[in-house]
Image: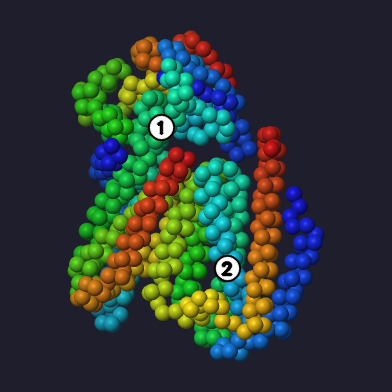
Amino acid sequence: MKVFGTLGRVVLGVGMAVILWGAFLYAHPAESFVGESSRIVFFHVPMAWIAALAFLLAAGHSALYLKTRQIERDDAAASAARLGILFCFLATVTGSIFAKVMWNSYWNWDPRETSIVLLLLVYGAYLGLRQAIEEPERRATLSAAYALVAFATVPFLMFAVPRMYASLHPDTVINARGKVEMSPDIKLVFFTSMTAFTALFAWMYALDVEATRLVRRLEERAAGGNAA
Amino acid sequence: MRLVAEKLCRSFGPRKIFGPLSFATSPGKVLGVAGANGSGKTTLVRTLVGLIRPSSGSVWLEDESLPASRISVRESNGSIGWCAPDLALYGELTPSENLEFFARVSGRPIPREEAERRIAEVGLDPKRLRTIRTRFLSTGQRQRIKLAYAVLGSPAVLFLDEPGSNLDEAGHRAVEAIVTAQRNRGSVVLATNDPLELALADERVTL
Amino acid sequence: MILRAAAAVFVKDLRTEWRTRVALNALLLFAFSVLILVGYAVGPTRLSLEDRPVVNSVLLWIVLFFSAMTGLSRAFVNEEETGTASALRLSAPPAAVFLGKLLSNLALLGVVMAFVVPLFLALMSFGIAAPGLFLAILVFGAIGLASASTFIAAIVAKTAAKGALFAVLATPLLLPPLVAAVTGTRVAATEPDLAAGLDAVRLLFAFDGIMITASFLLFDAVWRE
């Protein structure tokens, strides 16, 4: 199976270049932010969004694995969790850099910082669990159960933790008044960036799932089993 | 009740253990499972009793008068009994406490006298074992208690995996007595390498 | 039927535990050593008055958390290691096994808490202004610790690493309730008013509810793997 075709990859590559140009040269810095720091929104928010999307996918595929017992569901959940950790980490780093510029401190236990660290811990533990189990079906079942229990407690943590410390985090993209408040040029670059990064994630995800599938087929062939 | 297996397969990852196998037990009959060491007898029996999920194919219990009545082995709750080398009872409980415990969790509690009667049935002296925890028993004595555990719920299908291991001559006769008694109640699946035990089988599956 | 079977599992666990006292002794010895360490190293007077409630609350829950991590995995690890899990799996309904194990873990943790908490309060001269709130935090905190530990123990019992993995898997799940328990304990130490700590109790209650529900739904898959 060919993932994404040549045209798709060219479009994706050009798109990412356009976003770099748009983020640093086209869009104007937003008001009420220190210097040029608002430009990080074009990268930080897509990272956080993709991390959330990836963890949602991981939980969804875990639930489907327990229902259908198709090992491909487990591959998909594992790939999503791996990429989720990567993007979660990038969101943490970009957020931390922004915090340094805005509030002169890399880390101040802002509720969002706290919850993102917890997400990293949870999915790090998930991958640790996967490594500790040799047998594929057992690994799939146990890690799916863990992912789902973790996923059930994550929303709780999102609501619970923010009350413990006051938040410094700027309004989320869609603010409390239910509107997107951005100047037109920022809005344009921002939503292009969201789309492009989501496409990038989709490509990486498809590649990772495909790679896992190929590894499994190689293993089956090596064991002399009937590779499907 | 009879046990039916259809195209049953099990592999661990890429490694295939057994299958595809199709067979059925019939009431009053003993189905022997033969095969060299490492041929997957124990895995097959564990799959049949529902401790291992089959990789493909299925296994179920059905009432022979009602062919449509499929019950999954897992939901059968008490219709099966199992004795195997990898079965262990609680070492810190006395033999009769073990039997009482397993009877209670399966929803059919038995009084102490009944548990002791079951212990006597497998040729042990319940009075002498009253204060002895299971882990202090000899391997052969423990094997007999495991046999008593297997027939505890008067199962419709009894699974015996190497039932004669560690047993003396009298122990082997106890196994034979259990198999004979089970013929009146249902069927037996007997996995063994012992030719004497295999001689009890009416039909045979070879792995 | 489920409740009766769960009670049987609970009684069986208590009886075997009472005959060996392995988990209980390990837990109590561990808790006692840490108490001595904390009592000696930090002590009642070394902290300034305003720091006391916060630091003592944190220390108390750290002691309880690590005690839970040392002993509560035995619930399932022991069954799998001695091979009794198969017999239990065949005989008992999964929900009853989970409930019974949860109760026996809760009992074990209860004994440890009954030992640790008064000693800690005495050693650290840690005064509690709202004992009712404190008790509620302890009870709901214990239920949270025990339910998450029981479920995670069922998972790690099926892996090769077992003990090493137990804390790794349990910690991220337990951080939010622990933060709530620490906050609640601090409030109970300083504010005589019950209402002030209600937020923490509510959080713990919500966590316990979610954790127990999710565990019941998923335990079947884990237990029968």
**Residue pointed to by mark 1:** B75
Residue C35 visible (yes or no): yes
Question: A15 left or right of B2?
Answer: right
* Front position in the image: A224 or B70: B70
What residue is rendered at 41% in x and 48% in y? C217
Residue C73 visible (yes or no): no
Q: Which mark is residue A49?
A: 2
Q: Does residue C223 sit above or below B200 in this rendering?
A: below
Q: Position of residue C174 (x, y in %)?
A: 39, 61
Residue type at the position of mark 2: Trp
What residue is rendered at 63% in x and 79% in y? A187
* Front position in the image: A127 or A166: A166
Q: Categorize mark 2 by other alpha carbons within 10 Å: few (<14), some (14-19), many (20+).
A: some
Q: Please tell me whether mark 1 sits on a helix, a strand or a loop.
A: helix
**Which picture quadrant has residue B177?**
top left
Q: Position of residue C143 (x, y in %)?
A: 30, 56
Q: Please tell me whether mark 2 sits on a helix, a strand or a loop.
A: helix
